[in-house]
Amino acid sequence: MKTVHLVSVLVNALSLTIASTALAQPVPVTTPVPVAAPTGHPLKGVIVDIVAEKKALLVKHEEIPGVMRAMTMLLKVDAPTLASAQKGQVITATLLKKSDGWWLENITPLAPTP
């Protein structure tokens, strides 16, 4: 009976030692990994049409080296940009690929060339 009691005491002591050692260990600190913002590409083009129901502009743009050839494509824009856009307007902008398609941001109208 003494042996059983001694084993029980030793098991309890060992459990307490392991528990206190585990509590004394430093907790690793994890730093959140920042999510990279979408990278943009400079674009120069002409607004061919305004497609309000799709919240987009049809833009004929120059080649964007390393991204796409020159073409005419539908590009999404925010509401204020859609409201101020004009057909035939020459623009520069930042082209961004988002989860729901290609977007134009930072649109700047250029003065017409005489």
Image: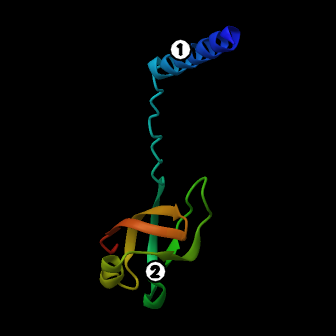
On screen, residue 101 above or below 85: above
> Residue 17, which numbered label?
1
Label 2 secondary element: strand
Color scheme of the displayed model: rainbow
Q: Are there few (<14), some (14-19), or many (20+) residues within 10 Å of tag 2?
A: many
The furthest residue to the bottom: 53
Dot 2 amino acid type: Leu
Q: Which residue corresponds to mark 2?
A: 57
Q: What residue type is labelled 1?
A: Thr
Looking at the image, which residue is at 55% across and 65% down? 99
User: Is 48 situated left or right of 112 in this image?
Assistant: right
Seen at 47% across and 48% down, the residue is 35
Q: Quadrant of the C terminus?
A: bottom left
Q: Which of 88 and 95 is in front in this view?
A: 95
Closest to the observer, 54 or 58: 54
Residue 78 locus on image (x, y percent): 37, 75
Q: Could you tell me if the residues under marks 2 and 1 are in contact, i.e. CB atoms within 8 Å?
A: no
User: Camera-side residue: 39 or 4?
Assistant: 4
* x then y, percent, for residue 75: 50, 75
* Secondary structure under the numbered disc 1 in the rendered image: helix
Residue 94 figure quarter: bottom left
> How far separated are the C-alphas under marks 2 and 1?
69 Å
Q: Going 58% across and 54% down the picture, which residue do you hit?
A: 65
